[in-house]
């Protein structure tokens, strides 16, 4: 059996006058389409869960949104393509007229619930890795001057090298950058990673400077 969360009642009550009927209609359609749905609040706006995330709604100053967690697997004719002007699949909802009919919306909820019943997963494309920052010439010169530091740096994993480079290139002034380069060479010569102070020892305790 489904449940209603009093925090959703409060959310609707505090919404702008134009948003109240929109949110109320969405809520009713979700419960009609999936009687066992569970209401909750995540990221400060209402979510509807049924064997996992089902959909969510939100109200803003001038529009509302409605989004399905597995929208890419729902019938395209029902949700359309994702708009660029608002989150969710229905763009900026400014009145109940912008919503599908109650029957169509409940059917869409049923379809989403069936996907969760079947345990269907959405295959999401992995995020492209951030490009490695370009090493400043001054840092490369300092590395060449210290064989030990250069050897340590060369043996570091790409993620640990990135930590050093990001720390150096993000310096806001040349003086700060030069100071960080000097510190980096000192730590590398001692065989240390950028965040060596926060690494745990074999005994499971944090290292100390």
Image (tube, grey):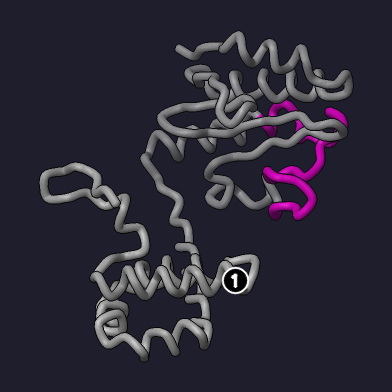
Regarding residue 128, the answer to whether it shows in the image is: no
Please report the residue visible at 49 percent of the width from the left and 63 percent of the height from the top: 127
Please report the residue visible at 54 percent of the width from the left and 41 percent of the height from the top: 69
Can you say whether 53 is above or below 195 in the image? above
Q: What is the quadrant of the N terminus in the image?
A: top left
Q: What residue did someone put label 1 on?
A: 175
In magenta segment, residue 197: no
Please report the residue visible at 76 percent of the width from the left and 46 percent of the height from the top: 86
Residue 196: x and y in percent read 30, 58
Which secondary structure lies at badge 1?
Answer: helix
| Most common secondary structure along the magenta stretch | loop
When asked about the image quadrant of residue 150, the answer is bottom left
Count the labels in the image: 1
Q: Is residue 64 left or right of residue 202?
A: right
The residue furthest top is 6
Of 199 and 80, which appears nearest the observer? 199
Crowding at dot 1, Cα within 10 Å, few <14 / some 14-19 / many 20+, comes out as few
Residue 122: x and y in percent read 45, 51
Of 92 and 140, which appears nearest the observer? 140
Q: Is residue 204 left or right of residue 92?
A: left
Residue interval drawn in magenta: 81-105
Q: Is residue 166 left or right of residue 84?
A: left
Residue 203: x and y in percent read 11, 44
Residue 48: x and y in percent read 55, 26
Regarding residue 11, the answer to whether it shows in the image is: yes
Can you say whether 114 is above or below 3 in the image? below
When asked about the image quadrant of residue 176, the answer is bottom right
Please report the residue visible at 70 percent of the width from the left and 25 percent of the height from the top: 26
């Amino acid at each position: 059996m489904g449940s209603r969360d009093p925090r959703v009642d409060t959310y609707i009550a505090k919404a702008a006058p134009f948003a109240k009927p929109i949110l109320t209609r969405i809520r009713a359609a979700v419960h009609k389409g999936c009687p066992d749905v569970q209401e909750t609040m995540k990221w400060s706006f209402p979510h509807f869960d049924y064997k996992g995330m089902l959909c969510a709604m939100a109200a803003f100053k001038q529009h509302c949104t409605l989004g399905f967690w597995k929208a890419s697997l729902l019938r395209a004719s029902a949700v359309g393509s994702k708009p660029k002007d608002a989150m969710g699949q229905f763009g900026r909802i400014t009145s109940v007229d912008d919503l599908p009919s109650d029957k169509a919306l409940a059917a869409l909820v049923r379809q989403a619930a069936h996907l969760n019943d079947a345990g269907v997963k959405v295959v999401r494309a992995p995020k492209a890795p951030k490009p490695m920052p370009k090493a400043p010439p001054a840092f490369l010169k300092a590395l060449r001057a210290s064989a030990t530091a250069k050897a340590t740096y060369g043996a570091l994993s790409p993620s640990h090298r990135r930590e050093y480079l990001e720390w150096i290139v993000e310096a806001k002034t040349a003086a700060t950058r030069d100071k960080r380069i000097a510190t980096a060479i000192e730590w590398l010569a001692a065989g240390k990673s950028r965040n060596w102070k926060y690494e745990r020892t074999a005994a499971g305790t944090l290292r100390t400077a």
